[in-house]
Amino acid sequence: MEYGKKIVTPIEGAGGNLFAALPAPGPEEALATLLDAGPVRIERIVSHGHASPPGFWYDQPDGEWVVLLQGAAEIEFADGAAPRRLAPGDWLDLPPHARHRVAWTDPDRPTVWLAVHYRAAAGGGD
């Protein structure tokens, strides 16, 4: 799932502000786990002009629902679907193994994402 090294910071407590204590720009995205409870994991991701390396595709065993809260980004899909340019409030539901990559994030301001990772239901459905 991961490419390179991400800065992972646990956030303690039962509440907080998603825009508080945003990390300074660095060589990698900053990922903070807000909740890890059974089949659901919620993360705050902060990007500063980061993108997936050329040729790299996420291929995750779990689904991921992601909403862009601040900044801008573009997601590309390995299946040839049109790239999606995201602005604040835009969200995507990426099913398990939906190969995708981050093509671009705003280099001039922090891009803040909220990602909800979830396990697919047993039996797989359709």
Image: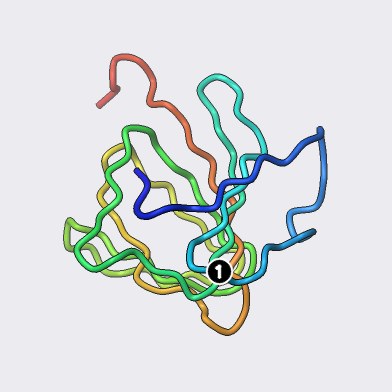
Q: Position of residue 108 (x, y in %)?
A: 58, 84
Left or right: where 11 falls relative to 95:
right
Q: Position of residue 72 (x, y in %)?
A: 53, 74
Q: Position of residue 81 (x, y in %)?
A: 23, 63
Residue with the most extreme bottom position: 108
Quarter of image, res 53: bottom left
Against 109, is 52 above or below? Answer: above
Please give the name of the residue rendered at 62% of the width and 40% of the height, measured from the top-left corner: 33
Q: Quadrant of the C terminus?
A: top left
Q: Position of residue 42 (x, y in %)?
A: 59, 39
Please give the name of the residue rendered at 29% of the width and 22% of the height, measured from the top-left corner: 125
Q: Nearer the viewer, residue 23 or 65?
A: 23
Quarter of image, res 74: bottom left
Q: Nearer the viewer, residue 76 or 107?
A: 107
Give the tally of numbered discs: 1
Q: Quadrant of the N terminus?
A: top left
Q: Nearer the viewer, residue 61 or 4?
A: 4
Against 73, is 16 above or below? Answer: above
Q: Nearer the viewer, residue 10 or 39?
A: 10
Q: Residues within 10 Å of mark 1 (few under 14, many from 20)?
A: few
Quarter of image, res 90: bottom right
Left or right: where 50 falls relative to 109:
left
Q: Which kind of residue does numbered mark 1 sit on?
A: Gly
Please give the name of the residue rendered at 28% of the width and 22% of the height, measured from the top-left corner: 124
Please give the name of the residue rendered at 34% of the width and 52% of the height, measured from the top-left corner: 3
Q: Secondary structure at mark 1?
A: loop
Q: Write down the residue under mark 1.
A: 26
Q: How is the image coloured?
A: rainbow
